[in-house]
Image (cartoon, grey):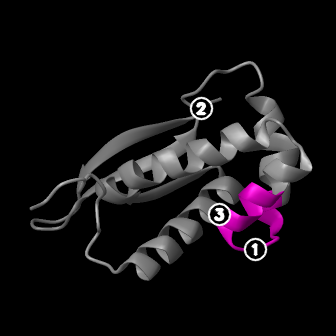
Amino acid sequence: MRHHTNKRTLGRTTRQRTALLRGLAQSLVIEEGITTTLAKAKELRPYVERLVTASKKNTLQSRRFVEARLGTKSEAVRKLNDTIGPRFNERAGGYTRIVKLGRIGKRVAEFARIEFVK
């Protein structure tokens, strides 16, 4: 039975998928916008929005939560807590947008751009 199978596996094992999302999230935070496949963008959106919601509090606990999810104490963690989190203090959610770019080639996946809302 296929109960509770609501996540996209992206054709990867759990560890590979976690590493992929961490890398995409770090790139998104540092560059504030990346181009990837539509499926990856849709899977990345809730992952990043939880990080932004946590970083809005800017407490030690929220910093540790963000570090744990991103896997490192990197530039992305500092930028998320110091600039991106406070930018969205007044906003209740919906920190990212996904813009569909269409297919590139005949049988290639559909591409999209995910970026932070200004």
Q: Secondary structure at mark 2?
A: loop
Quadrant of the image occupied by residue 27 = bottom right
Kindly identify which residue carries mark 3: 69
Instruction: Tally the numbered discs.
Output: 3
Marks 3, 2: nearer the viewer: 3
In the depicted structure, whether residue 89 falls above or below residue 97 = above
Q: Which residue is mark 2?
A: 117
Q: Residue 12: where, in percent of width, then height?
A: 32, 78
Q: Decide: is 83 above or below 36.
A: above
Quick one: label 3, few (<14), some, or many (20+) residues within 10 Å?
A: some
Q: Is residue 74 magenta?
A: yes
Residue type at mark 3: give it. Answer: Arg
Q: Which residue is found at the position 81% from the left and 59% from the top?
A: 64
- Which residue occupies 83% across, 33% down? 86
**Gap between marks 3 and 1, in whole Å?**
8 Å
Which residue is depicted at the point 29% across and 69% down?
Answer: 10
> Which region of the structure is painted magenta?
64-77
Q: Nearer the viewer, mark 2 or mark 1?
A: 1
Residue highlighted by disc 1: 72
Question: Badge 1 local density, few (<14 within 10 Å), some, or many (20+)?
Answer: few
Q: Which quadrant of the structure image shows residue 118?
A: top right
**Main SS type for the magenta part?**
helix
**Residue 79 located left or right of residue 95:** right
Instruction: Determine contact: label 2, label 1, CB under 8 Å.
Output: no
Tell me the distance, in whole angstroms, between the alpha carbons under discs 2 and 1.
25 Å
Residue 70 x/y as whole percent: 67, 66
Which element carries disc 3, helix, strand or loop? helix
Asked if 80 appears above or below 76 in the picture, the reply is: above
Residues tagged 3 and 1 counted as in contact (Cβ below 8 A) = no
